Amino acid sequence: MTPTNRNQIVSGSVPALTILSVLLTSGCSDAAPSPTAGSGSQVVGQGTAGVPAAGRTGTNVAGSSTPSSSAGVTATTAGRAAPTTGAAGTAVAGSTSPGATAAGANAAGAGDSGTGATAGDSGSAAGGSNASGTGGDSAATAGATAAAGSGGASPNPGVVEPDQPGPYEVQLDQPVGEGFGVPIASSDVGDGVAGCKTFAESFGSDPMATMDLIKLPPDLRMDLYSLYRPAVLEEGKKYPLITWGNGTCAKPEGYRTLLRHVASHGFFVVAANSRQVGQNSPMTKALDWATAANKDPMSPYYGKIDLDKIGAMGHSQGGAATVSAARDSRVKTVILWNGGSSATKPFLAVSGDRDGANSLPGYKRATGNAPKGAYLWYHMIPGDGPYDGHLTLMVEPERVVGPATAWFRFILQDDPISKPWFVGADCKLCKTPDSFEFGQNGLE
């Protein structure tokens, strides 16, 4: 079946850390809502994690090849007005000076209408209502699909640093995978509250906030999948594929910041909707679906997926499921978020202080014993609970989106910009031991 394009608008502040602790302790990881793009026809590739990328009424802003021109980085913090250079409701072509701003009826961020985007050195542009950008590497039209800049150049993630928003707008397709579903877990029946209520409440957090976080949307097919992908699929181009596994009692949109960021760099990310991914192998069945869709001339994804470049990642229970998925011959590399310290394929294992029984010496040993792998261990964890280190990819997603994207670009695409993040005595992840520790074995 042809998937429905669903664009969810999320507003409000991040719930208290203690509420998240309830859901993520021991793998129950339905994350705090982080703002997403508005209600245009596509979802915008977001800026700095947790920061809105467009106005509430929904427009599309394409990030350019320079960090200063990425939507959500400079001019899109929630509630802050960005300077405008054009009349209300009109579009101004991208400036040729770094950091200049083009805006529509209102400034970017959590505005009521219109949009804005910072223009980079090449002069990317964003429009207000029914306006279009005119110059730059990845100009965009409001509420429509991204258009390449002058000359029709395609977006090029290889010139964008991995921790910056990628050049692609991101579209969420739900549901996908008809015919490749998995049995629905008992915790995922109905609104999902009954299956997780006892588990969540056992940690003593605020009952109302807890229920809001574990409740399932009525139209979310728990047997199927959500697909995060570039909104415009370029002719003749194939995109690497990542399969994602949720933590216990979590759903894909709980990780929206991470998944959208990776997709904005030109990846298909297919996420099992199941909140019990350790059962029935939904992560590899998602690959079965993607393989079939790629070969089906009637599929919108026909010929668009690079089946030679497949990775997997998951959180908590999903991390353990990713260890299992690594045994699939199609999977070339994995990232393990707070669940598992090594795998049979090249891996990046991520944890941090106060993450239950996980320990830095254990992660170092696992990496040292592997032919090709790495660990990333976070310090400076907010809060004082014994499981706060389990929450970093939700509470502080801006700390994790760069390493995750760099890993897949490096291992799957041999990207020269991403390689120095992990390789060399002066590697990017080697420079801030107070914030996190990094080590690798066999990467070159």
Image (cartoon, helix red, strand yellow):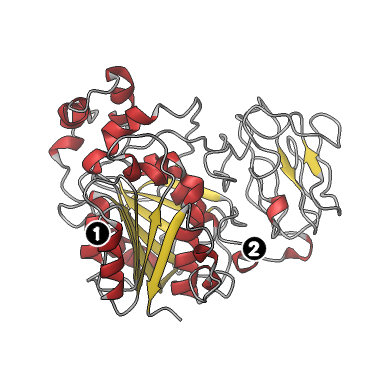
- The answer to whether any part of residue 242 appears in the image is yes
Q: Is residue 325 above or below residue 398?
A: below
- The answer to whether any part of residue 4 appears in the image is no
Left or right: where 52 falls relative to 312: right
Amino acid type shown at disc 2: Pro
Which is nearer the eye, 386 or 417?
386
Q: Is residue 426 above or below residue 315?
A: below
Q: Nearer the viewer, mark 2 or mark 1?
A: 1
Left or right: where 35 falls relative to 356: right
* Element marked by disc 1: loop
Q: Mark 2 touching mark 1, by CB under 8 A? A: no
Residue at left offset 25%, top offset 73%: 344
* Labels 2 and 1: the sequence-earlier one: 2
Which is nearer the eye, 125 or 336?
336
Which is nearer the eye, 258 or 168?
258
What crowding class fits label 1: few (fewer than 14 Cα within 10 Å), some (14-19), or many (20 or more)? many
- Mark 2 vs mark 1, CA separation in Å: 35 Å
Query: Which quadrant of the view contains residue 364?
Result: bottom left
User: Which residue is the site of mark 2?
Assistant: 155
Query: Which quadrant of the view contains residue 341?
Result: bottom left
Amino acid type shown at disc 1: Gly
